[in-house]
Amino acid sequence: NVKGTIFGIEVQLSDSVRMEFGSEDNNTVERKTYARFTTALPLSDHESMTSFSISKKAFQNSDIVNLGDLEFVERSNKIRVEKLLNGVTVVLGEYNAPTKGASCTLYNSAGVALGTSLTGDNGQVDLKGIALIPRGLVSVACKGGTYTDEATGKLIDLGQMVIRAATIYSGTGPLMMLSSPLSEVAYQLADTNSGDRTVIAKAIMRQNIAVAAAFGVTGIDITTTTPTDINTNKATNDDAGKFGMALAAVSQMGENSADSSPAETITALVADMADGNIDGRVVGKQTVDMTTAMNNFSNGEGANNITDGKGAGNVIGVTNSVAFITLGEATTNTYTVVLNTQPTGNVTITPNSNDTGAATVSAAMTFTSANWSTPQTVTVTGVNDADATDETVTISHTITGAGYAGVTSANVIASVTDDEIFFNNLVYSTVTSPDTGKVWLDRNLGATQVATSKTDSAAYGHYYQWGRNDDGHESSSSAAVATIASSITNAGNLFITSDIDWTNADTSGALRTVAWADGGANDICPAGFSVPTEAELTADTIGATTTNITNIDTVFSSFLKIPTAGYRNRANNGSFHSAGSLVLLWSRGTNGVKAHNLNISSGTATSSYIDHAYGFSVRCIKN
């Protein structure tokens, strides 16, 4: 069911080189086959540039280099079949008031520019030639241009000033991205790590909503709503009118504070979001607060005024308790909705998730003339899916009945955090310590499931010799050998039997303490996780207070649910012992001769030090 005009197979030859072949224009009589060879820049660290040539007989347009093809796209080392749709409809724009001649550039989640064009008289431009935009963060940066200031009526030239906007794109459908002083404020608030787009992606939706609420336009998407130009039009009581009034108020604040440029006003507004007082205050200057600025326009003192046919305090509508919620997969969060005015009969509000594969919502609610003012709860449930991607879900509300037909309600944005970790062909989740707040894997390394009982063998996992890599020796089915390794990083794949240690290369254990940390030479944990230090392992087990861990029963009842995996002996051909009766967990601590471990039996729970050659369980902790 491939509906795109292009159908092809892409083979990743290395981290930076791809080969693609297929057919295009499949829905027309012009159908033709093609093959493409592309390289991504920059190259990976372990690769280097080489020379290559492509025969013009084998490839179309081989003498044309399309820089858009050089965008780096992360891929698994698999053959990947994809469809390329007809292209994405993209509209970019900038609004202080409508800004003409601004150079607007669209960027994908990796920060790669997808296209640039100049805005017209209406402050917008259709960006052509965008074939595909990956799901995730997208942003627009508009530089320069001119606009007529609402507060003064003067023509403002922005020069080299850049105003940005960002949002999370679903990966399908048209895209509209409009930058404004409000979207720039949200962008700066989301960018807490010097342009790190991963950080921006996690915070931008929340900041867009927070800025909209702070400037009196709750429920309005400040990155997609085209504001009314109140220089030339009346601002009616709709989203466009309200947004236009908010931008006009920003101009008024800049005028009353005698700001030298819009950039100075934006800087003040970013500070306002921190102090909670939206007044556009710049130290040492006369200022005006948001309410006064809005009133200047509604009283006719600005360039225009707002028309509102509804009486204050008697507006038919629906109020949500929040605009943004967060939750994890397989967890829930809630918010409430309530009517603003008493209906003449029953009103039904039905929550709708735009992505039920990421989050579902509870059923419809009915408000009556008796309970209309009592908030009712919407429950949002994260879906435990098979991917490892954080997802953003938009929850809309369908409203019907008793004079509320046609009434709209603000959307609620749900950020669903993926807690699954795919590592070495297993899927792990995480658990959080009630004592330290530390995050741990939910099971031992190598276990196929969380322990359902203290003797659940499927939860025992692997048996690691202390400080050793996951080279295969850890498997319960690995054979044993008596030959001591001469390296800590290249010890083969067999379990090494020895009275003391499996290697003669690190007698103190200092090298292996470092090697077992995240990113170390013998790192056996998922990225961002490490084998715990002695202090970390102790604090959340025998040092915990939420659960008093004194034996194998209490350690299983703790949040870690540690099973009695026993151990693999350093001698006797690596034989297994004490499964069902002992818990033995390594930390990466050492006393210079022996390694630290947690030792829990039916009657005791202690820390101890023991020879490095034993095979014990490992539970990873997040850094």
Image (spheres, grey):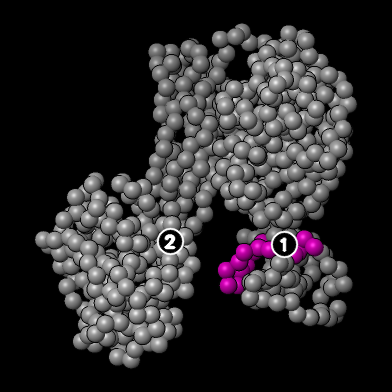
Q: Is residue 357 left or right of residue 551?
A: right
In percent of the image, x 28 and y 80: which residue is there? 613
Position of 190 relative to 18 (above/below):
above
Can residue 54 be seen here? Answer: yes
Image coordinates for residue 453, horizontal then vertical, percent: 21, 60
Return the residue nearer the eye: 338 or 201.
201
Position of 37 relative to 314 (above/below):
below
In percent of the image, x 39 and y 83: which residue is there? 505
Image coordinates for residue 38, horizontal then vertical, percent: 74, 71
Instruction: Give me the C-alpha separation between circle 1 and circle 2.
Output: 30 Å
In percent of the image, x 63 and y 10: which residue is there? 310
Amino acid type at mark 2 = Phe
Amino acid type at mark 1 = Glu
In percent of the image, x 81 and y 79: which residue is there? 54
Image coordinates for residue 564, horizontal then vertical, percent: 21, 66
Contact flag, marks 1 and 2 (Cβ < 8 Å): no
Position of 158 relative to 14 (above/below):
above
Q: In this view, does 280 lie to the left or right of 610?
A: right
Q: Give the range drawn in magenta.
A: 67-83
Question: Which disc number belongs to residue 529?
Answer: 2
